[in-house]
C-alpha cells in the first residue's frame, strides 16, 4: 500500500509546527503564496502564544506515496491530544532540539508512542543554530532509545535542510497500514468539532473497509445513525473526496447535530454492512484540576452551556457538570488537565463565543472517607462533609520527572522540598561538560497546579523541563479554609489546604482581598478561618467624609458638634446595613490569579 501515516511528537518549542511547514512546502501541498508560519496552528490562540493546542491532520503527496501527517501539541496539559493522534498512525517522528536536547515531555511522548507499538524515527532539529550540539544530543537520544548514531536524522525546520531525506526515511521505515479493504467498514473518531452548517464534523482514521458519500452509517458507541453527507481529507483545509479507504485519514460529516451522539474514541461503521466489534477507542482521561466556571451575567448561562458542549467536541479531555453558587448563580464545575488547559479553556470561551466568565479558585479531587464507612470524591470545598463525620482524606499524588542542567539540581531540590515532594532517584542523561540530569520525585498534585512551573523556571534560569503523571491517592491532613468578609462566610472563596499551610494560604488570600475590595462607610474585617479558629486577618478602614471642611473659624464646639453628628449617622447606617459588603467579580479573579 502506498500510504504512510505518522505524527510528530516532541517537547514544547522544539520546532514541530515549523518542521510541518517545511514538509508542506517540500511536498507542494500548499502553494508558496499561501504559506505562513505555523500553518497547521489554525487557532488564533496558537498563533499568538506560539504553541500547538490542537492536533491537526494533513495529507501530502510525495514520490507517488500518500503521507498522512498529524501535528501534535507538546505541553503536558495536552498529552491527551498526543495519545489520540498516536492511535491513528503507524509511526512517529521523535523531534529533539539540537540546542536543548532531550526534555521531560520528549520522554513522556516517546513512552506513549512505544505503548502503541509505533515505529520511531529520531530526528535532531534546529541544527543550524549557533549553540547546537549534535554530538551531545545524539548521545542523549542513543541513551534513551538504544539506537545507533546512523539511525538519527538531522534537519532544520527553519531552512529546510534534511527535510527531503526525512520524507524518504518516513517512506522507508514506517510500515504501511494493513490491507483490510474487504472487511466491514470501521473508522476510529480521533477528533471532532461543531460546524453551524454541517453539524458535527469528525476526524477519522479508516481502520477497515471503506466509506463513501451517500452510505448509511452508525456510531457503534452511541447507536446514533446518519448518512455520509461529505467525506474527504485535510489539505490542510477540508477537501471532499467522496470516499475514504482503509488506512486513510480524513473527515466525515453525517448531519448529526446532537452533541452527545458523536464521541471521540467511538467507531463508525456501515449502516447495513456493519462490523460486529467496535475498535478499542481511548482510555478515559482523568481530570486533574477542577474549577467553577460562571457567566458574569446570569442571562448568559444558556449560551455558556451551549459553548461548553461545543468545546467538549474539540477538547475531549474536558469534564463538566452543572453547579450552583449563591453568589455567582448557575454555572459548571469543570475538570481539566492543568492550569494552562484551564487558561486556554477560559480564553476560548471568551474569544469563540463572546462570553465574559468568572472562574473560582482551582482545586484537585479529594477522596473523603466518612466515619460511617461511606466514601466520596469531592471536587469543591463546598462538598466537604462536617469535620466530625470525616475519618480521613486522601489526595492525588503524581510521579514528577524534571530534566535540568547539573548546576541547578540543588535549587530544584530545595523548591520541591518546600512543596512536600519525595525524592526517588537521579538519572544522568549525559556525561562531561554540560551534564544534564533527570530528577524523579513523587509530589502531591496540589503543589503542582498553582505556581510550581513558574518557580521551577525561575530557580533553573529557564533550563529545567517538567513532566508529571498520575500515580495514586495518599492520606493527607487537609482542612477547609473559609474566608469571612464582614463576619459572613463567602463560600466561593473557600479552599482546601494542608493544615500546616493554612496560615500562609489564608494570609495570602486576605491580603489580596484587602487590595481589591472597595472601602465602605464602616470597617471591613477580612478573615481566614478553619472552623472557629481565625488563622489570618486584615482590616479595611472606613471611609470618612471630612465634615469639617466647610468650617472657616469659630469655636471648637462647632467642629465637635459636626463630628458627633457624623458618628451617630455611621452608627445608624451600620445597624441598618448590618455591614454587608458587595464583592465585585474582580475580587474573585484577583484571588484566582494569585
Image (cartoon, rainbow, N blue to C red):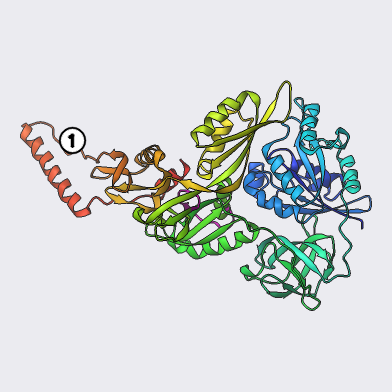
Residue 335 is situated, as x and y percent measured from the top left of the image, at 54, 55
Pick the front one: 359 or 413: 413
Please tell me how many numbered marks the rendered image carries.
1
Task: Find the magenta span and give its range.
Answer: 350-366
What kind of element bears circle 1?
Answer: loop
* Residue 505 at least partly seen: no
Q: Position of residue 284 (x, y in %)?
A: 63, 58
Residue 551 part of the magenta segment: no
Q: Residue at x 60, y 42 (%)?
A: 399
Q: Residue furthest bottom?
A: 272
Closest to the observer: 146 or 463? 146
In the displayed structure image, the side of residue 466 where residue 131 appears, left or right: right
Q: Is residue 360 magenta?
A: yes
Residue 164, given in percent of the width and then of the height, sits at 89, 41
Q: Measured along the vertical axis of the image, is residue 89 above or below residue 208?
A: above
Give me the residue at 74% from left, 24% from top.
431
Residue under circle 1? 549
Amino acid at each position: 500500500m502506498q500510504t504512510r501515516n505518522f505524527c510528530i511528537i516532541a517537547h514544547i518549542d522544539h520546532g514541530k509546527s515549523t518542521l510541518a511547514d517545511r514538509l508542506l512546502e517540500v511536498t507542494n501541498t500548499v502553494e508558496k503564496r499561501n504559506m505562513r508560519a505555523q500553518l497547521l496552528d489554525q487557532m488564533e490562540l496558537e498563533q499568538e502564544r506560539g504553541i500547538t493546542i490542537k492536533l491537526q491532520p494533513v495529507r501530502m503527496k510525495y514520490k507517488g506515496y500518500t503521507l498522512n501527517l498529524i501535528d501534535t501539541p507538546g505541553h503536558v496539559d495536552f498529552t491527551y491530544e498526543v495519545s489520540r493522534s498516536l492511535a491513528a498512525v503507524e509511526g512517529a517522528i521523535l523531534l529533539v532540539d539540537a540546542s536543548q536536547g532531550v526534555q521531560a515531555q520528549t520522554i513522556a511522548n516517546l513512552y506513549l508512542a512505544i505503548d502503541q507499538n509505533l515505529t520511531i524515527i529520531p530526528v535532531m532539529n534546529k541544527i543550524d543554530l549557533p549553540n547546537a550540539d549534535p554530538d551531545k544530543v545524539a548521545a542523549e537520544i542513543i541513551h534513551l532509545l538504544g539506537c545507533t548514531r546512523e539511525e538519527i536524522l538531522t534537519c532544520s525546520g527553519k531552512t529546510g535542510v534534511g527535510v527531503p531525506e526525512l520524507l524518504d526515511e518516513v517512506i522507508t521505515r514506517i510500515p504501511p497500514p494493513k490491507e483490510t479493504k474487504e472487511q466491514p467498514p470501521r473508522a476510529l473518531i480521533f477528533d471532532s468539532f461543531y460546524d453551524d452548517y454541517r453539524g458535527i464534523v469528525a476526524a477519522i482514521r479508516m481502520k477497515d473497509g471503506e466509506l463513501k458519500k451517500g452510505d448509511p452509517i452508525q456510531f457503534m458507541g452511541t447507536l446514533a445513525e446518519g448518512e455520509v453527507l461529505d467525506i474527504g481529507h485535510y489539505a490542510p483545509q477540508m477537501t471532499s473526496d467522496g470516499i475514504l479507504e482503509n488506512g486513510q485519514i480524513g473527515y466525515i460529516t453525517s448531519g448529526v447535530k446532537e452533541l452527545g451522539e458523536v464521541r471521540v474514541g467511538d467507531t463508525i461503521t456501515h449502516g447495513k454492512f456493519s462490523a460486529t466489534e467496535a475498535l478499542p477507542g481511548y482510555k478515559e482521561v482523568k481530570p486533574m484540576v477542577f474549577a467553577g466556571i460562571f457567566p458574569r451575567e446570569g442571562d448568559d448561562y444558556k449560551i455558556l452551556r451551549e459553548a461548553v458542549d461545543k468545546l467538549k467536541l474539540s477538547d475531549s479531555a474536558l469534564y463538566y457538570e452543572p453547579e450552583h453558587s449563591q453568589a455567582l448563580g448557575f454555572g459548571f464545575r469543570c475538570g481539566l488537565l492543568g492550569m494552562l488547559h484551564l487558561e486556554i479553556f477560559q480564553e476560548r470561551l471568551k474569544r469563540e463565543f463572546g462570553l465574559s466568565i468568572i472562574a473560582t479558585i482551582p482545586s484537585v479531587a479529594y477522596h473523603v472517607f466518612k466515619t460511617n464507612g461511606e466514601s466520596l470524591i469531592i471536587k469543591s470545598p463546598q462538598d466537604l462533609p462536617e469535620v466530625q463525620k470525616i475519618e480521613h482524606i486522601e489526595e492525588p499524588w503524581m510521579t514528577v520527572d524534571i530534566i535540568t542542567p547539573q548546576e541547578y539540581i540543588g535549587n530544584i531540590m530545595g523548591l520541591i522540598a518546600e512543596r512536600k515532594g519525595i525524592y526517588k532517584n537521579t538519572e544522568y542523561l549525559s556525561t562531561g561538560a554540560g551534564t544534564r540530569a533527570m530528577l524523579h520525585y513523587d509530589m502531591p498534585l496540589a503543589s503542582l497546579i498553582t505556581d510550581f512551573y513558574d518557580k521551577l523556571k525561575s530557580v533553573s534560569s529557564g533550563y529545567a523541563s517538567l513532566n508529571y503523571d498520575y500515580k495514586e491517592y495518599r492520606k493527607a491532613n487537609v482542612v477547609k479554609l473559609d474566608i469571612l468578609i464582614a463576619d459572613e462566610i463567602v463560600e466561593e472563596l473557600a479552599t482546601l489546604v494542608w493544615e500546616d499551610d493554612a496560615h500562609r494560604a489564608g494570609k495570602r488570600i486576605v491580603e489580596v482581598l484587602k487590595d481589591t475590595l472597595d472601602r465602605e462607610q464602616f470597617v471591613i474585617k477580612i478573615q481566614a478561618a478553619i472552623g472557629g479558629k481565625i488563622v489570618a486577618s486584615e482590616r479595611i478602614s472606613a471611609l470618612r467624609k471630612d465634615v469639617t471642611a466647610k468650617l472657616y473659624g469659630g469655636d471648637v464646639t462647632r467642629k465637635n458638634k459636626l463630628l458627633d453628628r457624623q458618628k451617630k449617622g455611621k452608627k445608624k447606617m451600620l445597624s441598618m446595613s448590618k455591614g454587608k459588603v458587595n464583592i465585585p467579580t474582580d475580587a474573585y479573579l484577583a484571588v484566582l490569579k494569585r
